Amino acid sequence: MGQTNDVFTYRDGKLFCEDVSVEDLCAQHGTPLYIYSHAAFVSRFRDFQKAFAGIDPLICFAMKSNGNLAVLRALAREGAGADIVSGGELFRALRAGIDASKIVYAGPGKSCDEVRAALTAGVYMLNVESLAEAMLIDSVAGELGVRAPVALRVNPDVDARTHAHTTTGKKGNKFGIDLDVAIRSFEAAAAMPHLDVCGVHAHIGSPVMQLEPFEQAMARIVELIGLLRTRGIGITRLDFGGGLGIAYRDETPAPPSEYAERLIPLIRQSGCRLLLEPGRYISGNSGILCTRVLYRKETDTKTFVIVNGAMTDLIRPALYDSFHRIHPVVDRSADTETVDVVGPVCESGDFLAKNRELPRVDAGDYLAVFSAGAYGFAMSSNYNARPRAAEVLVSVDRAHVVRARETYDDLIRGESIPDFLA
């Protein structure tokens, strides 16, 4: 197979993460197993820093893609902030050492308690998705005796040309305020006594493979900022979200350097500080999911490779019909075959790949599922009473368990049987 990227490489037919044997990690820690590369996370964050260095943006890692504490700490040490979408993510970000002044709180359904926690912590900004939410934040800020820094999320009605479940910037999506009513909404929010309406937020979806939708959306937002200023609403922050795509198969997404070339002139025109919220670009190809072959099942029409990894570990193929490259951790066979790679969960949707040509594997062999660092463990579940996988972070030639594998006791933690059923 050759080199897969700069940190996951094959050496004499064996897969390595940086300088650590993936086969050894699977044998030592069991599977399913998430393996992350520290070098990959750091280098991809630095890609954004370098591309936008001329305008000093605030780069907030979209931690919904991967919220592991060790990953967050590694990025915090590089100067990253965090894009959060819940009170739980606020707790995680602060625990990992991310400065509250570098945290942006997004999401369309914040509760009073979550807003209170964010304002008490002193987050950089809250992104507001509706006037009803603005009223709630104004009320909580009034109780606390503060003015809440907010950006209103505007829906620029741009087609991100991505999956219907992950496009967020068109009319009819649940996110943001439609562009044609944006000015009235900003004026209404600016009239609320405990809000500091200092920003505009836009995010059109993910993963976006072409730059034109970004450029089109940014131009519309910059035009809006100019109109708002004529009405006395002084916008100083422009949060343009994330969404830059990665290569899952043979795609050729634009790098951050080309992304920056398109956006920086418009940002300078706006006179605002830029906030970026990359997630997938940083985390996606920084991690793999390893799984072990349990059985081969051959029928008249199909061959199934049944593995111990499942939709509970990586739901993207079932949820989005997403493609993830899969290859043996140790390449033992030159023969290939067309198979379905499926898990043990009792759902027909439990698959990692369908009709995939792979080298032949047998029971006991390990498979690596690539591009699994984003929305892999973060979206995993305990369905079918399956403990969640362990996570390992590799740095050069050392591996660190950064999340222990769940046990059966973890599955029932917090549950109880009432006395009347004793």
Image (spheres, helix red, strand yellow):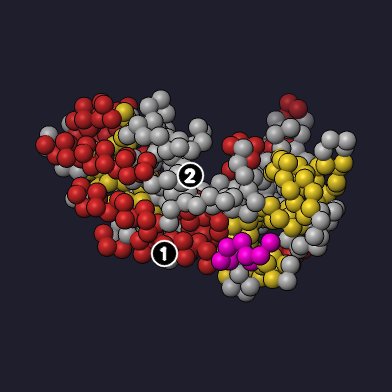
* Label 1 secondary element: helix
Q: Which image quarter is the N terminus in?
A: bottom right
Residue 269 spot, x, y in % from top left: 19, 49
Q: Is residue 236 above or below residue 204?
A: below
What crowding class fits label 1: few (fewer than 14 Cα within 10 Å), some (14-19), or many (20 or more)?
A: some
Q: Is residue 46 above or below residue 181?
A: below
* Label 2 secondary element: loop
Residue 309 spot, x, y in % from top left: 72, 47
Q: Is residue 368 left or right of residue 191?
A: right
Q: Nearer the viewer, mark 2 or mark 1?
A: 2
**Residue picked out by circle 1:** 46
Residue 391 spot, x, y in % from top left: 63, 57
Q: Main secondary structure of the magenta part?
A: loop
Q: Which labelled disc corresponds to residue 207?
A: 2
Q: Which image quarter is the C terminus in?
A: top right
Q: Residue at x 40, y 56 (%)?
A: 256
Q: Which labelled disc corresponds to residue 3?
A: none
Q: Is residue 302 left or right of residue 162?
A: right
Q: Front-most of 407 and 311?
A: 311
Q: Residue at x 47, y 51 (%)?
A: 253
Spatial distance from mark 2 to mark 1, Cα to Cα? 19 Å
User: Can the viewer see residue 228?
Assistant: yes
The residue range painted magenta reads 1-9
Q: Residue at x 42, y 45 (%)?
A: 210
Q: Is residue 67 above or below residue 198?
A: below
What amino acid is labelled 2 in the image?
Pro
